[in-house]
Image (cartoon, grey):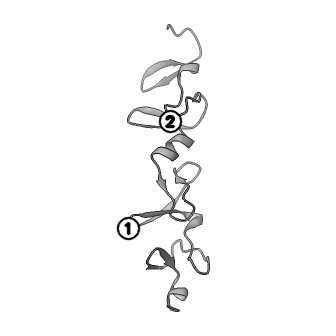
Amino acid sequence: QTLTKGGVTYRDEPWHKECFVCTGCKTPLAGQQFTSQDENPYCIKCFGNLYAKKCSACTKPITGFGGGKYVSFEDRHWHHNCFNCARCNTSLVGKGFIPDNDEILCRDCSSDL
């Protein structure tokens, strides 16, 4: 239908505010943080659940929104605040670590093996 006022522009196309919704949950996206996948707009929650890497510690999506820094090692990923030694829980961000099967250990804890 004709857009007469108060629309949203997405990918250089005009949309009614009420028609510009998340591809996953159909929540209106006007004025909200959103991202896209394969040219389809998604709210942050749907994008995280469908496409984002999952944290190996807390299993929640790593979206990168809100300063979402993360650490990757081989095929695993962690939020910065989740990248801790599996034994003593000290942060391993920016420090050396030792992989031990599914666990990541600090050097002190790995020396006890």
Depth check: 92 or 52 in front? Answer: 52
Residue drawn where x is 59% and y is 74% of the image: 91
Residue drawn where x is 38% and y is 67% of the image: 74
Q: Which residue is mark 1?
A: 74
Whether the residues at callouts 2 and 1 have beta carbons within 8 Å, the answer is: no
Neighbor class of circle 1 (other Cα within 10 Å; few <14, some 14-19, many 20+) is few
Depth check: 19 or 2 in front? Answer: 19
- Reading the chain from its start, which is encountered first: label 2 or label 1? 2
Quarter assignment of residue 36: top left
Neighbor class of circle 2 (other Cα within 10 Å; few <14, some 14-19, many 20+) is many
Kind of residue indicated by mark 1: Glu
- The x and y percentages for residue 64 are 52, 51
Instruction: Return the mark for residue 42.
Output: 2
Residue drawn where x is 56% and y is 42% of the image: 45
Instruction: Return the mark for residue 86.
Output: none
Quarter assignment of residue 84: bottom right
Distance from label 2 to label 1 (Cα)? 28 Å
At numbered mark 2, what does the secondary structure look like: helix, strand or loop? strand
- The x and y percentages for residue 52 are 47, 49
Kind of residue indicated by mark 2: Tyr
Depth check: 49 or 108 in front? Answer: 49
- The x and y percentages for residue 95 are 51, 77
Query: Which residue is at the far bottom?
Result: 112
* Above or below, comparing residue 1 to residue 59 in the picture: above
- The x and y percentages for residue 37 are 42, 38
Residue drawn where x is 61% and y is 81% of the image: 88
At numbered mark 1, what does the secondary structure look like: helix, strand or loop? loop
